[in-house]
Image: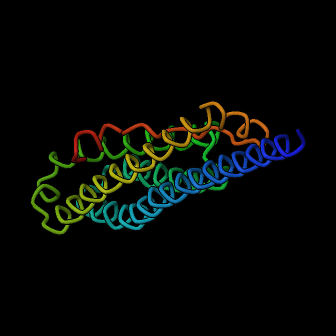
Amino acid sequence: MTPYVTLVALLIVFWAVGAYQRLLRQRKQCRTAFSQVEAQAERRHELIPPLVAACRMRMPEEGAALDAVLAADKATLAATAYAARNALGIDALVPLIEAEAMLESALHTMFVLKPHYSEAASDLDLHRLIDELSALESRMAFARQVYNEAASHYNAARVQFPSSVIAVVFAFTPVASLPATGTQQAGRP
């Protein structure tokens, strides 16, 4: 009888280690995928100040709208870093989602104002920066999609029995998904 009990105990230990390793691997995939979102946010943060500076030269009366874009960009970058530091939990992603919405709104306002200024509408450098931002938003949308898929797989593995037992015992918390923003859905700011 003892060899059977030992065999069953060993099988349970091997299963538990395997389930733990699987959850660790999937959580790491979520963090790796989010690092791509973070990298694209940093690149956008590098691109927005020159874009705003170019707009400021062509649309000097719109200082408040342009300042709102810069403030929203800084808030988004800070919220992205906060989410990465706080294990991508649902509470950690709420500020990021709100900051992204604020940035989207500020960019939309800036792009709506641009056609009202003939210098801004015909500036090739400004158009190049806008096209670069559009391409960057597409890359960011793809990075978000990859992250959301990784989060979905991880969350599914977390709740499937018998891995759910390991998830509870070792505090594998769920990770949140990122919604696609309107500019990303439209494909162009």
Q: Position of residue 42 (x, y in %)?
A: 46, 64
Q: Position of residue 106 (x, y in %)?
A: 38, 43
Image check: 54 left or right of 116? right
Q: Position of residue 27 (x, y in %)?
A: 59, 51
What residue sits 56% from the left and 51% below the top? Answer: 26
What residue sits 45% from the left and 49% below the top? Answer: 147
Image check: 74 left or right of 143? right
Image check: 157 left or right of 124? right
52 is higher (above) or lower (below) than 98: below
Q: Nearer the viewer, residue 100 or 120?
A: 100
Q: Position of residue 185 (x, y in %)?
A: 27, 39
Q: Nearer the viewer, residue 48 or 148?
A: 148
Q: Nearer the viewer, residue 98 or 139?
A: 139
In what quadrant of the picture does the N terminus appear?
A: top right
Residue lying furthest right: 2
- Asked which quadrant contains residue 134, the reply is bottom left
Q: How many marks?
A: 0
Q: Nearer the viewer, residue 15 or 186?
A: 15
Colour scheme of the picture: rainbow
26 is higher (above) or lower (below) than 155: below
91 is higher (above) or lower (below) than 81: above
- Asked which quadrant contains residue 108, the reply is top left
Image check: 75 left or right of 123? right
Residue lying furthest front: 1
